[in-house]
Amino acid sequence: MQNPELYALEVEEAGHAISAASRLLTRLLDFEQFCHKVNASHFTKLLQKVLKSDIPLYHKDWVAACLVKLSYLSGPNFDYDNPINLEVTLYETIPRLIEQMKTSYSREVEEASVVELNRIISEEVVNSTRAVAAEGGIFPLVKVLENGSERAVEAALAILYNLSMESENHAAIIAAGSVPILRRLVLAQGPHWMRALRLLRTLPT
């Protein structure tokens, strides 16, 4: 069995190399002559595998950027129905936004992350709610209800309501401490009490 520390080091080194290569490829794609010669399909398949791999999330930003740029070779519009754009959203954008919610000490960054996440969810991107739950997004979203700005709370309530439509998420939403927070929001009769009540009614409390 491989040493876990050695494996982690190898994954980190691979991440650095992949990130650097993706950054170079992204910049080369600015040159029309290179675009005519590059095998876009080959690089797209390789980078799609990398996007779903175990390399650290912070090494995937250039991978995602490169994939989006490669997809532009077949059309300039960002469309979630495009498989590449969908994968970038599920495997890089959503995890990155959740990571920012978990680790940022800035209320502005937290708010921007939650609002952007809500935009993705509200556009009904395929499997987006599952991706949020799988990435551990429920606990930080509930934390936003308690400490976030008005705009962030509104977005978090909307996301959690969408997540509550899947019964398998109920246990995690309750375990995150949402029920007493939602009850406080309802009793306070603040700007979001109706949204809080709607979410509360979907949970088996």
Image: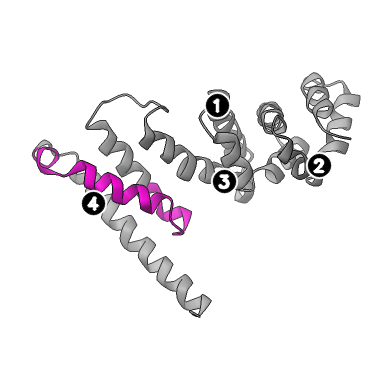
Give the residue pinned by disc 3.
100
Q: Which mark is residue 174?
A: 2
Q: Is residue 3 magenta?
A: no
At x 54% / y 41%, what residue is drawn? Answer: 97
* Label 4 vs 1, first from the N-terminus: 4
User: Which element carries disc 4, helix, strand or loop?
Assistant: helix
Q: Amino acid at mark 3?
A: Gln
Q: Is disc 4 in contact with disc 2, using a CB cutoff of under 8 Å?
A: no
Residue occupied by mark 1: 119
Mark 2: amino acid? Ile
Q: Quadrant of residue 181?
A: top right
Work out how far the residue at label 4 is from the one at label 2, CA to CA, in angstroms: 45 Å
Helix, strand or loop for disc 2: helix
Please tell me which residue is depicted at 68% across the width and 44% down the height of the picture: 140
Which residue is painted at 22% across and 47% down in the image?
Answer: 42
Query: Bounds of the magenta span?
Result: 33-62
Q: In terms of secondary structure, where does tag 3 sit?
A: helix
Q: Which residue is mark 4?
A: 24
Display coloring:
one colour
Q: Earlier in the sequence, mark 1 or mark 3?
A: 3
Give the side of residue 126 with respect to residue 185, left or right.
left
Does label 1 or label 2 sit earlier along the sequence? 1
Residue 58 place in picture, x, y as percent: 45, 54
Q: Residues within 10 Å of mark 1 (few under 14, many from 20)?
A: some
What is the CA distance from the residue labelled 4 to the residue labelled 3? 26 Å
Structural distance between the alpha carbons of marks 4 and 1: 31 Å
Label 4 is placed on what type of residue?
Leu
Q: In front of the other: label 3 or label 2?
A: 2
Mark 4 surroundings within 10 Å by alpha-carbon count, few (fewer than 14), some (14 through 19), many (20 or more)? few
3D distance between C-alphas at marks 1 and 2: 24 Å
- Element class at badge 1: helix
Comes first in the chain, label 4 or label 3: 4
